[in-house]
Image (cartoon, helix red, strand yellow):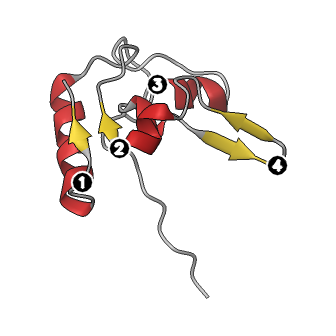
Amino acid sequence: MPSAPTRSHAHRPARPSPASPTRHGARAGIDRFLVPATCVGVRPGELHAPHGLELLYEGVLTMNPLTPHRELFERKAASYRARWPWLRIEA
C-alpha cells in the first residue's frame, strides 16, 4: 500500500536562506511557526508551547515576532479562518 503524501510547508524554502535560518531540532522549528497559537509540540510526557496555550484556547491568531512574514501570516490566518470561522485574527 502506498504511503500518503507528506504535506510540505509552502512558507519555508527548501534550502536555508537568510529568511529561513537553519534550525536545530524540532523545538527550534516549532518556535518559528507563523502563528504563535500553533507553536505547540507534544510527545510522551512532554509539552513544548513557547507562547503558552492561552492564544490557542482563545482562538486568537497573531503573527509570530520570530517569523515576521506578514503576507505569509495573512494567508495562513485566512486559511485557518476558512476552516474555523470562530477564530480571531489580531495583527
Looking at the rendered structure, the secondary structure element under dot 3 is loop
- The numbered mark, 3 or 1, whose residue comes first in the sequence reads 3
Q: CA distance from mark 1 to mark 2?
A: 7 Å
Q: CA distance from mark 3 to mark 1?
A: 24 Å
The answer to whether 10 appears left or right of 41 in the picture is: left
User: Do tag 2 and tag 3 residues touch (Cβ < 8 Å)?
Assistant: no
Above or below, 90 relative to 56? above
Of badges 3 and 4, nearer the viewer stands 4
Q: CA distance from mark 3 to mark 4?
A: 22 Å
- The numbered mark, 3 or 4, whose residue comes first in the sequence reads 3
Measured as percent of width and height from the top left, residue 2 is found at 57, 82
* Residue depicted at x 46% and y 16%: 21
Q: Which mark is residue 59?
A: 2
Q: CA distance from mark 2 to mark 4?
A: 25 Å
Q: Nearer the viewer, residue 50 or 67?
A: 50
The residue tagged 1 is 86
Disc 2 residue type (three-letter)? Gly
Of badges 2 and 3, nearer the viewer stands 2
Disc 4 residue type (three-letter)? Pro
* Residue depicted at x 48% and y 33%: 54
User: Do tag 2 and tag 4 residues touch (Cβ < 8 Å)?
Assistant: no
Q: Which mark is residue 32?
A: 3
Disc 1 residue type (three-letter)? Trp
The answer to whether 46 appears left or right of 6 in the picture is: right
Looking at the rendered structure, the secondary structure element under dot 4 is loop
Residue 29, by quadrant, is top right
Q: Which mark is residue 44?
A: 4
